[in-house]
Amino acid sequence: MAAKYTDESIKSLEWHEHIRLRPGMYIGKLGDGQSPDDGIYVLAKEVIDNSIDEFAMGVGKKIIIDIDDRSCRVRDFGRGIPLGKVIDCVSKMNTGGKYDSEAFQKSVGMNGVGTKAVNALSTTFTVQSFRDGRMKKAEFSKGILIKEYKECDTTEKNGTEIYFEPDAELFKNYRFLPAYLEEKIWNYAYLNTGLSLIMNGKTYVSQNGLLDLLKSRVDENIRYEIIHSKEKDIEFALTHANHEGEHYFSFVNGQHTTQGGTHLAAFREAVVKGVRDHFKKEFDANDVRNCIIGAVSVRIQEPVFESQTKTKLGSTTTAPGGPALRSWIVDTISKEVDNYLHKNDVTAKALLERINQNEKLRKELAGVKKLANERAKKANLHNRKLRDCRHHLSDAKDALRNESMIFITEGDSASGSITKARNAQTQAVFSLRGKPLNCFGMTKKVVYENEEFNLLQNALDIENGIENLRYNKVIIATDADVDGMHIRLLLMTFFLQFFPEVVEQKHLFILQTPLFRVRNKQVTKYCYDEDERDKAAKEIGKKDLEITRFKGLGEISPEEFGQFIGEEMRLETVAIPPEASLEKMLEYYMGNNTPARQEHIVQNLRADAVEEL
C-alpha cells in the first residue's frame, strides 16, 4: 500500500534545520579533522573568506586567527558588519552585503550562506562587530539565538570577530590541526599581497604574490627564472622543472580551486599559444606543458562553482552578460608570455631546450607505449585486475560522477573483502600484485615497462594527463603494518613522480581502517588507534570483553568492511605540504639513504620503540 500523501506530509524546515539535516550540501563531508578537506576546515575558511573580502575592498590589513583543538576565532579589522544587521547576517539565509556588486564585486562567496552554515553547525557561535566606537554582540547555539547583547560603546578598532566551536555530535571526535590550515593561510597571503595573517602567533605575508608561491615550491632544478605577470584581475606565474607531468595552482576570487575548472583549462591553452606564437612553430601541446609548474589567479563577477565547497569553476564568462572567460584568459596570458620571451632571450632559449627534450622523450616512448597498451589489452584488465564500477568521473553527463572512487589494494584477500563489501555503482577495486617498484628518479618509460604501473594508469586513464581521470577519488587501501605503509609510500611516489596533478587536484587519498575491534556480547566498537581502543574498553567494561587487533585488511570480513567504506568512511587526503619542493621531498624520503633521513628516523622514534630496541 502506498504511503499517505496529505497536507501533513509537506514540511517546511527552518534555515538552520535544513543545514543540519543536509550539511554535505553546504560544507562537503563532515570528518574529524584528520583530513585537510574535512568540514571543520571549511567552516574556518568560510569565516576567513569574509575577512579576506574586507581586505579586497581596501579595508583592514591584518587578520588574526586563533585555533586550538576544539575552537576557532577570527578577528579582522575591516569595516565591521553594520550593527543593525549583525544578527541577520549570520542567521538569515540570502542575507549579506555581497549582493551589492558595488560593495563586493569580486568576492569569494555570493550566496549569503557561508557564515550561516558555520552558525548552524556549531554548538557555540559568537559574533561581534565593532564600528565607529560602538559594538554589537550575539551568541548562538546550533543556529538558534541564545543571547543578544545591547549595543554599547567600545574602544576596539573597527572590524568583526567570530568565535565558534563545531558541533561534536556532527563532527565526531573532531580536532583542529592548524597545520592543515597552513596551506590555506599561505594561499590567502599570496593572493592578497600586503595582507598580514597571524595564525596562533605566526605571521604569513607575501609581497610578490604568485611569484612567492612558485618560489616556495621549486628548487634549483628549474630550467629558467619564473615568468610572472600581474595585470588587472589576472595574475600568473610559471616555469619548468625536471619532474614529469604538470603542476598547477589555480584560484578564483581568492578561492583555491583544487580541481581547476574553466580558468585553468584556459591558462593551459594560453601558455601553449604564447609559446607557439613566439617561436612561430606548432609545438605539440604536451611537449610545451610537460614538467611545467604554474599558478593562475583571476577575479570575476559572480563566479559559478560546481559545488558549495568551490573546488572547481564552472563559469564561462567574466560577468553575467560579459566577455567569454576563456578568450579573455587565453588572449591576455598568451600575449604576456610572448612579450616576456621577446624581452628575455635566456629564458626563451632554456624554454625551447625543455620543449625539444620533451619532444625527444615523447618520440622515444611512442614505441614502448604501443607495446604497453597492447599488453594491457591482452591482460584483460577489466576482469583480472580491475573490478570496475558503473559511474565514472570522465562522464560529464553522469549525475553520480563525483561519487566515483577506486580502491587500490594489494593481495587477493584484501581486494576480495573490499570487492564483496563495495557499492558497485560508484566503487571500483584495483588489485596490485606484490610491492610496487620504487620509481623515484626514473623516467616515465618505467610506467610502460612495469606491468603493474602500466595497468594502473590504464585503469585510471591518466596516460595523457588527468582530463580523462575515471574516478573522483583514488584511494590507497593497504594494511596498517610496516609492509602496508611501505606500499603506500611507493604508490604515492608513483603519483607524485609521474602524475602530480592527481595529488595537486586532491584526488588521492589514504583509506583509514580500524586497528582494533572491541566488543562483548552486546556491543561492538571499532577503534582506529590505541586511545580509541582504551576508551572503548573502559566504556564497555571488563565483563566478556574481547579486543581484536586487525593485522591486515584481509582479516576484516566483507560484512564489517562495508561499514568502513560507506558514509562514515575515513579518508586522509594526500597533500604536498606548503612551501615544500616536490623534488627535494621525494629525494629525502625515497632517494638513497642519507644521513639526514637516518637522523630524522632516530630522533622521531617513539620512546616505547626505543625501549624495544
Image (cartoon, helix red, strand yellow):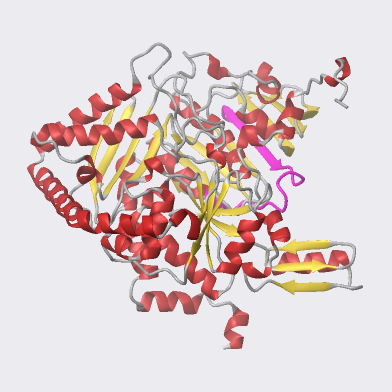
Number of on-image labels: 0
**Residue sitting at 82 percent across and 19 percent down?**
10
Quarter occupied by the N terminus: top right
Q: Say if the magenta span includes residue 161.
A: yes
How far from the left and from the top, in percent, is residue 106? 44, 22
How far from the left and from the top, in percent, is residue 491? 44, 62
How far from the left and from the top, in percent, is residue 477? 55, 61
**Residue sitting at 24 percent across and 56 percent down?**
242
In this view, the residue in front, 290 or 465, is 465
Q: Is residue 559 left or right of residue 581?
A: right
Q: Is residue 545 left or right of residue 219?
A: right
Q: Quadrant of residue 208?
A: top left
**Residue sitting at 51 percent across and 30 percent down?**
306
In the current view of this chain or complex, which residue is farthest to the right?
A: 543
Quarter occupied by the C terminus: bottom right
Q: Indicate whether 256 appears above or below 145.
A: below
Q: Say if the magenta span includes residue 302.
A: no
In this view, the residue in front, 411 or 69, is 411
In this view, the residue in front, 437 or 456, is 456
Q: Is residue 172 left or right of residue 74?
A: right
Q: Quadrant of residue 231?
A: top left
Q: Indicate whether 454 appears above or below 598.
A: above
In this view, the residue in front, 47 or 421, is 421
Question: Can see residue 43?
Answer: yes
Q: Which residues are magenta?
A: 157-180
Q: Indicate whether 227 appears above or below 179.
A: above
Question: Can see residue 128?
Answer: no
